[in-house]
Image: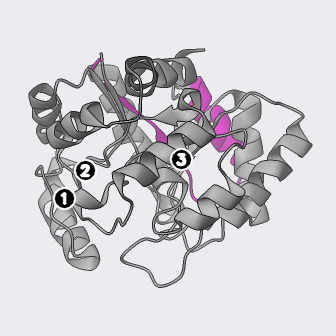
Amino acid sequence: MIIDFHTHVYPEKIAARTVEALSHAADVTAYTDGTLRGLLNSMKDAGITKSVILPVATRKDQFDTINRYAKEINDRYDEVISFGGIHPDDEDIPGKVRFLKDNGFRGIKLHPDYQETMINDDKYLNIVCECQRAGLVVITHAGKDPAYDKVHCPPQEGRELLEKVYEETHFTKPFFVFAHLGGNRQLSDVEKYLVGQNCYIDISCSFSRFGHFCDNSDEDVVRVIKNHGADKILFATDSPWNGQKDYVEHFKSLKGLSDREKEMILRENAEHLLYT
């Protein structure tokens, strides 16, 4: 069993133009057509059992639309789990989080670049604390996004948010995920500020061999996994922006990780985070 913790899909009516726009903005190639059907076909080809879909609210007025579509996916398909989306400018954050919890969502996605808010802003602190109290997972884009000059979630500020959340909630169970090996194109700061902390790190867009705005070597990835702890690493691809089959095969071939560590990363850690 393999769980991909970081994927994206778009409603069929807008998938083609959304993929085209994002491909142009970030100068990247899509490996599916961006639809749910495209993801399911990709998963079957890659031998992936379940994928987590991560919607992004780029405006506060998108809450109802985004989460209605996400709930429809969750109600109809067992092969995927869609998280919800919250914008930092949303009103009534406790109410929004309660709605997601009551409707069976297991987590939310934040994208500080698309939402033009620094990750250590009090708006995010409010959201993340509410999610922690509700038992929801939070995953954020981390590091450089090729479509933006400013980095809104650098590792140091990410750690500041994390420390504030644990101080305010007094909870210690790790529930927060930094995507892209903790910070795309910011490896030295990831190792300085995030590695070893009480958080998860996903490995989407983490291997330079696949291009797509990443500059980490295989040795870099293995070192972060070893130093952070394989029990807090999540397998993830960022589909459609990486090919799931290629990503699975490359991860399985990595030298320096035991079969046990790979099994934890491919399946067990995600199951623990999602279901316990």
Where, by quadrant of the figure, is residue 215 drawn?
bottom left
Return the residue nearer the eye: 207 or 184: 207
Query: What are the residue bounds of the magenta stretch?
Result: 78-102
Q: Amino acid at mark 3?
A: Val
- How many numbered tags mark residues here? 3
Q: Is residue 205 visible?
A: no
3 and 2 marks in contact (CB < 8 Å) = no
Mark linked to residue 10: 2
Q: Pointer 3: residues within 10 angstroms few (<14), some, or many (20+)?
A: many
Mark 3 or mark 2: whose residue is earlier in sequence: 2
Where residue 183 appears, as percent x and y from the top left, is 53, 61
Mark 1 or mark 3: whose residue is earlier in sequence: 1
Is 250 drawn above or below residue 259 in the view shown? below
Q: Amino acid at mark 1?
A: Ile
Coloring basis for residues:
one colour
Q: Which residue is mark 3?
A: 224
Where residue 192 appears, as percent x and y from the top left, is 69, 60
Question: Which image quadrant: the C terminus?
Answer: top right
Residue furthest to the front in view is 256
Left or right of residue 154: residue 145: left
Q: Amino acid at mark 2?
A: Tyr
Is 112 drawn above or below residue 199 in the view shown? below
Q: Which residue is mark 1?
A: 14
Q: Is residue 62 visible?
A: yes
CA separation in Å, label 1 and label 2: 7 Å
Which residue is located at x 70 percent, y 49 percent? Answer: 127
